[in-house]
Image: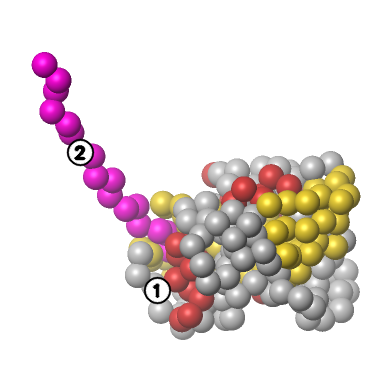
Amino acid sequence: MLLALTDHLRCTAGHAETWLVARADAVRDGWMVAGVLGCPVCHMERVVSGGVVAWTAGATATSSPRAATAPDEGAVMRLAAQLALAESGAPHVLCGDFGALAPALALALGGVAVAPLVLLDPPDDSAAGLATIIRGAPHVPFAERSVRAIALDALHAAPERIGFAVRALANGGRLVAAADVPVPTGIRELARDATQWVGERIAEPVTITLGRARR
């Protein structure tokens, strides 16, 4: 996992939001290859092995690596446009099968340093080293307003999970989901076709209180 993402990750246990503490046992070029992410509140530990974060004990890839076939270029460019991948260096999260496009997206962007990619439960772990892979998290494990864009699979678009995705998005951040998923509160729909819609998080107004001038 990319060490720079540690500041953005949050414990998903049922307590007040808190950051995680990283113990890196092996690091290569800014990537934690082996180590532990620990919560200072509940003391739960998430093990990092082979660059992959097991958010829950025993979380592993759901299938064997796919055959090395080139992804559809149209699908790659479509997702890059939907998520506005070139507009920010903040994390971009791909859930489920969207993770299969990560290597091609990283190549199109000129490297993960341009836009860090995070994969939640991708089909396999072949993108380790190009993207941060997290397995077994109950929902998007990021701080409020810390993520630039999220592509949701059916699991993470479930009613009990989608609110966490919206919360993690920065103001103006992009959200992509299947056409049959209701657009959640806090998201403005930008475009839609027969298969997907893309929306953005509505910016929340900031209240400014003016104090009295001192005499």
Say whether residue 108 is visible. Answer: no
Q: Residue at x 85, y 63 (%)?
A: 49
Q: Which residue in the structure is indicated by mark 2?
A: 209
- List x then y, in percent, for residue 116: 67, 50
Q: Which residues are magenta?
A: 196-215
Residue, x 20% and y 38% (percent of image)? 209
Residue 212 in the magenta stretch? The answer is yes
Give the residue pinned by disc 1.
Answer: 183
Three-letter amino acid code at the position of disc 2:
Thr
- Secondary structure of the residue carrying numbered label 1: loop
Q: Is residue 20 at all visible to an observer of this figure?
A: yes
Is 195 in the magenta? Answer: no
Q: Quadrant of the C terminus?
A: top left
Q: Is residue 73 left or right of residue 193?
A: right
> Quadrant of the image for the N terminus?
bottom right
Q: Position of residue 111 (x, y in %)?
A: 74, 45
Q: Are marks 1 and 2 in contact (CB under 8 Å)?
A: no
Residue ID at (79%, 78%): 58
Q: Nearer the viewer, residue 45 or 41?
A: 41
